[in-house]
Structures are given as structure tokens and as C-alpha cells.
Image (spheres, rainbow, N blue to C red):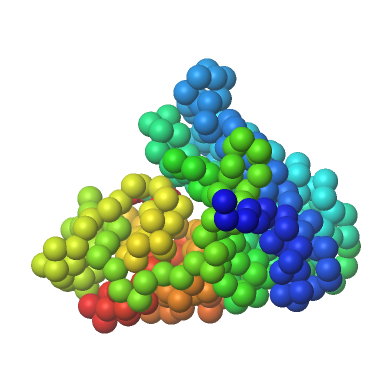
Amino acid sequence: MANIKTLAEFITERQHEFTYATGELTQLLTSFRLAGKMVNREVNKAGLAEDILGAQGSENVQGEQQQKLDVYANDLFIRLLRSQGEVCAVASEENEEIVHFNNGGKYVVTMDPLDGSSNIDVNVSIGTIFSIYRRISEGETATMEDFMQSGTAQVAAGYIIYGSSTMLVYTTGHGVNGFTLDPSIGTFCLSHANMTTPEEGNIYSVNEGNYFDFSEGVRNYIDDCKRQNMSGRYIGSLVADFHRNLLKGGIYMYPATKKSPNGKLRLLYEANTLAMIVEQAGGMATDGTTRILDLKPTELHQRCPLYIGSKGMVEKAMKS
Ligand code: P6P
């Protein structure tokens, strides 16, 4: 049997690649490893445990119906990040304001604890998306300045996909590696070493229900994909669509529409995270005109149009 390398062993082995002090990255990723296993457990039994399915009966900052698992995952990640001491503050899709830990930690985290959670009750894959930045503000407490850094400042970016198997995929700027959870031993094991995405692909992912709301250029690009007999694949769960396209090649688009002039997806904890990962895998991510990682954030929950995936496809979409 091929030798098994656990996520913990891999992180330790690659610690030298992490710009900062030894051991800090291990600590930083530990919370996501542990929380990923615990969320996975809840997601997998969602259909059985009546107290975990369905809407929480509350709305998040976006005015979106919170699912019980959204709240569970958010609370869990915050609790684990608070306890391990390296992170001093978190910006989460589920919280209007920055969550401060005031523990002197040198890092801040942006996260979507459970993206696509409206799909939970219909058994569609969902995901956790997270980015880690070094604190840059002075003083006791983190400030907005720490969260308004461009995506190029990320020290690590990753996602967990709860699908037919549960995988944690991350980068610290030295390539992308994927780890699959072996539930029999409760451990993430290296399954996709040095992931790269094909330069071209045959999959386009977009909500075509918005077709007549898109710009002429976007409509032309979609029409061109059809003329080339590409496969339309859109799960309605960003992490699942992104992950499939990362492996097989393809483009995911959430363009601006009349209803959502800045698109729907969030810059800090969706676009920036996936943009770092896709670039490290040889792909590309823009908002239609600017490289996602070069965008300068101005608000925690700001939205941006997103075109992400195979480099050749994103470049072509930009020229449409
Ligand atoms: P639409 C889920 O709500 C999400 O944020 C992403 O996971 C997904 O790709 C997108 O929205 C789907 O949005 O408008 O096509 O239903």
C-alpha cells in the first residue's frame, strides 16, 4: 500500500516553507482540521438528526436564512480558533462585525464556515472556505486594517469540501495539496499532492437562469461555450463547483447582474481564498477586469464578480 502521509506529518515536513515561526502554521491549521472532522460528522448525519436539519429561524448579516448547520459550524470554528491562541480575530460570513479574541495572536482569519448550506437538506456537497492573514495593525486589538489587506497578503488559503468524501485543500504559497479524510481513523491523509489545474477545460459553471441579466460579453462567452459543445455543470455550491473544475479544468462564473451589480460572492472569504488556491495551481481569477488578489477591500462583506478556473478559459471570457 502506498505510504500514507497524514496532514499533520505533511505540515510538519513543510513547516520551513511557512514564512513565519515554526509551529505556528501547524497550530493555525489544527483548528480547521479538527473542526472539519466535527462538521463532517454533523453533515453526514444531517438527514437523521432532526435537530440539525433545516433553517435556524434566524438571518445572517446577508439577510440569508441561516441553516442550523451554518450556526453550528460558525460557533465551532470560532470556539476552536479562540482556544488555540495564534488567531486574534475572525471575520465570518455569519457575523456582521469582526469577532475579537484579544489574545495577542499574530494572525487573523476570514471564513465562510459553511458555504452552500441551503443545499444541506437536499444532500448536495457543501464547503468551508478560509484564509489566514498576518496581523498588520499595532495595539492590543485587531482592526479593520487587518482585514482590508489585498488577497496577495494571504499566508494560507484553504477549503474543506463535504462531499462523497471529505477533503481539505490548502496552500501556503508553495503549491496546492489535497487531503482526504479517512473516517476509519479520523485522519486527513495526503491524496492529491501538488494539485494543478488544466490550462484549458471543457466545463463552464454559471447560473444560466441569470442569462438575460448578464452583460453582452458574458452572454457571448456562454454562447461560445455552447457552440463548442462544452459541458454546463452548475451545482449551486461554490466549493463543489470550484473543486470539480480545479481537478478537471473549467471556469466558474458569478458575473455582475442588474440585480447584483457586484455579483453575489464575497471578496474576503470566497473570492480571495479560491483565487490564491487557483493561482497556485496554475489557474486564474479575476472580477472581469482586475486580478482578484490585487483588489483592495473596503468592507468586510463586500461582493465582487468572479471568473475563476483554467487560465485559457478565464482569459477568453475576459476578451468576450
Ligand atoms: P445562485 C451558495 O449560496 C453560493 O454562495 C455559492 O455556494 C453558489 O455557487 C452560489 O451562491 C449560487 O448562487 O444565485 O446561482 O443560486
Closer to the camera, 49 or 306?
A: 49
Query: Residue lying farthest front?
Result: 1
Residue at 46% across, 70% down: 196
Q: Left or right: 311 with respect to 108?
A: left
Q: Residue at x 66, y 39 (%)?
A: 186
Q: Please count the marks in the image.
A: 0
Q: Find residue 135 and report its horizontal and vertical position in percent.
A: 77, 68
Q: Is residue 22 visible?
A: yes
Q: Residue at x 67, y 53 (%)?
A: 6
Residue 153, by quadrant, is: bottom right
Name which quarter of the figure residue 251 lies in. bottom left
Residue 115's place in the image compared with 11, above or below, is above
Residue 144: give x, y in percent of width and height.
70, 65
Which residue does the image show at 54% across and 69% down from the upper left? 194
Residue 59's place in the image compared with 228, above or below, is above
- How far from the left and from the top, in percent, is residue 134? 74, 69
Residue 179 visible from this viewpoint = no
Question: Is residue 223 placed above or below 259 in the rendered structure?
Answer: below
In this rendering, position of residue 53 left or right of residue 110: left
